[in-house]
Amino acid sequence: MLPAADELAEVLLDLAVPHEDIGDLVRMSRRVTDDPELRQALQASVAELVEGLGEIGTELDLPDLDWPSGPLQRCFPVYVFVAALPYTRAYHRGRGIPDDVSRRTLADLGRHMAVHRRRYGVAGVHAVWWFGHHFRGELYQLGRLQFERARLGRRTGTALAAAGLDVGPGTPCLSLHIPDFLGPFSPAACDRSLALAAEFFARYFPEEKYRVATCHSWLLDPQLRDYLPAGSNIVRFQDRFRLAREEREPSDTDPVEFVFGDPTLPVESLPRRSALERAVGDHLRAGGHWYTGHGWFPL
């Protein structure tokens, strides 16, 4: 269940929840603990979240909250993750995972609440489904990058097998993610993260052998090279990868969301303040499309 109200603020601070949201979350928590329907929904959601803790590739599907839309409905997932926190931390401790790695990993909740507030101007959790990876022990923040314990999908696994690697669909891999709000992802920062990951997974998940790292992101769209200098962080990040396959379905809203903060912004009014902003906006205004790149490199 939830911590007492006077302890909840400290837990929220550990999860990097924005300070302007903490008072309201503490206040609303009393409604969750006092209402039998909400307590039941909380218990069902936590049970769904922690079932099979540590397994790879389980989709998070929290029960819908049958409650009027408003602050409580937007923030109810926060209470789910707070209530599940003791289970997650126990899993981390059982693996011997250092407290600082655990804390930085789970603090991604606060970062996504900051994304939600930036976009909508109110408290809430952006991309609730994403936190199944964190709170189930699949994903870890190691320096600048996040590393998810994953398995190669059908198309990527088949492509890598065709390239001569002793892997295939279902083979364990590390999936890389680049969180925002953490500054540039310079080559040095990425090198440090990869070194940390090599040591981390060998020590804390020795039974899992990772032969490849993958990344599925618009940042790997080769068209970015047409707009950005060769020495830019994005191009140098791309240089680490080999493309597994070509994506044919456009993902135009992805770069708009991550560069400008809101995927619904009209293309014609996108700012041009930086080289990346000019690249994303000018390409779309010229009638072009952006695509998800599917990259990999051997570990």
Image (spheres, helix red, strand yellow):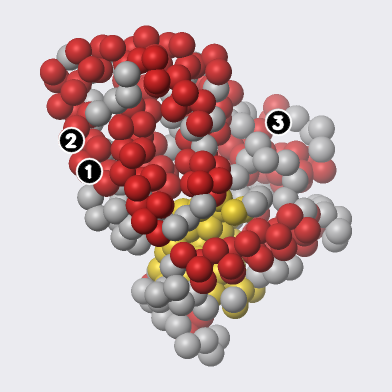
Mark 1 lies on residue: 48
Estimate how packed mark 1 is, as few (under 14), some (14 to 19) or many (20 or more) residues with alpha carbons within 10 Å.
some
Q: What amino acid is found at the position of numbered circle 2 in the picture?
A: Ala
Q: Is residue 200 left or right of residue 43?
A: right
Q: Is residue 106 above or below residue 38?
A: below
Which residue is pictured at 77% across the width and 53% down the height?
A: 186
Q: Position of residue 63 (x, y in %)?
A: 21, 35
Q: Position of residue 284 (x, y in %)?
A: 67, 43
Question: For this rendering, which residue is in front, 32 or 186?
Answer: 32
Q: What amino acid is found at the position of numbered circle 1 in the picture?
A: Glu
Estimate how packed mark 2 is, as few (under 14), some (14 to 19) or many (20 or more) residues with alpha carbons within 10 Å.
some
> Viewer-nearest of labels 2 and 3?
2
Mark 3 lies on residue: 270
Question: For this rendering, which residue is in front, 263 or 239?
Answer: 239
Q: CA distance from mark 2 to mark 3?
A: 42 Å
Q: Which mark is residue 140?
A: none
Mark 2 lies on residue: 44
What element does badge 1 sit on? helix
